[in-house]
Image: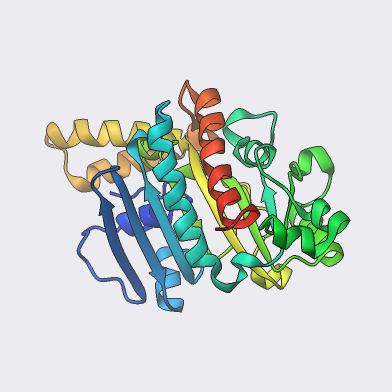
Amino acid sequence: MDYGIRTDLALEARESFPEDHVEIKGVVLTEEYDKKNKIRVSTVVIKDERGARAMQKPIGTYITIEAPELNKSDEDYHQPVSDTIANHLIKLAGEHTKEDVLIVGLGNREVTPDALGPYVVDNLFVTRHLIKEYGNEFKMKNRLGNVSAISPGVMGQTGMETAEIIKGIVEETHPKLIIVVDALAARSINRLNTTVQLTDTGISPGSGIGNNRNAINEETLGIKVIALGVPTVVDAVTIVADTLTQYMEKTGFEENEIDQFVSEIRSQQMDNMFVTPKNIDEAVKRISYTVSEALNSCFAQPV
């Protein structure tokens, strides 16, 4: 049951429809499962405006990688997850994989649930300065991609829209592809720190928590933009609504009574509260390594 809970995940938007098997015009969902590594990959393709209106997401491809054990400190598990991310990044990037790439780590380094982007950038192997210094022969000899990266901070720190900063960099350095990395909001607590979403539609920073900033996408920047995100927070109302709904269903309340009760909860002061796991510090640092490894293998040292 959907109560207008905020989420950045296209898969959760698809799941919000009453029946899982219902066909949504203009939307195609496919799934695959890696039994050995317990990794599920769901691809939602929004094909036209009908699908975009139904899903309330832009037209494009959304790939959700669910790895339930990503939250654990297990290097043997993180490697296949990183490989899966890399494989799907290459599919989305297409011919741009071997061209100049700018990787942008969105978010506020000082707020741990929002620090994924900056942490990922910290672990990247940037090469643009080396190629600029030593030339294409050095690039070819060492099989390097041309990668630059930045963590532009947030508007409260810089006084500038992130999109404005990126636009200036694009005009000066002329990358052919942008990868933006950001922390997301999820509807399900089970997806926190265990899910990665890739999309070729770009991103509107802060949209999942109702803090909309200028979009970062191909339309605004003139080059292909791929967004990579990991949900680190969940709307507090989600937890309350789900718990109360389960209780009220068991005690015999009618659906309309439950809907009315939950809608009243949404109008309370919890509307702008978000919850994050208590192990968020270590989780974000660990996942940032997994993501940066995938990015390095795709773009800095492509095989």
Q: Position of residue 88 (x, y in %)?
A: 45, 59
Q: Position of residue 84 (x, y in %)?
A: 42, 51
Colour option used: rainbow
**Which residue appears at 82% of the width and 49% of the height?**
160
- 103 relative to 91 in the view: left or right: right
**Which residue appears at 36% of the width and 31% of the height?**
240
**Which residue appears at 68% of the width and 53% of the height?**
103
Could one spot residue 40 in this view of the protein? yes
Could one spot residue 101 in this view of the protein? no
- 170 relative to 70 in the view: left or right: right
Q: State which quadrant residue 260 falls in.
A: top left
- 134 relative to 123 in the view: left or right: right
Quadrant assignment for the C terminus: bottom right
Q: Position of residue 176 (x, y in %)?
A: 70, 69
Q: Position of residue 229 (x, y in %)?
A: 53, 48
Q: State which quadrant residue 224 falls in.
A: bottom right
The one nearer the camera, 215 or 210, is 215
Question: In the rendered image of this protein, does residue 216 appear above or below residue 209?
Answer: below
The one nearer the camera, 268 or 47, is 47
Question: In the rendered image of this protein, does residue 3 appear above or below residue 52?
Answer: above
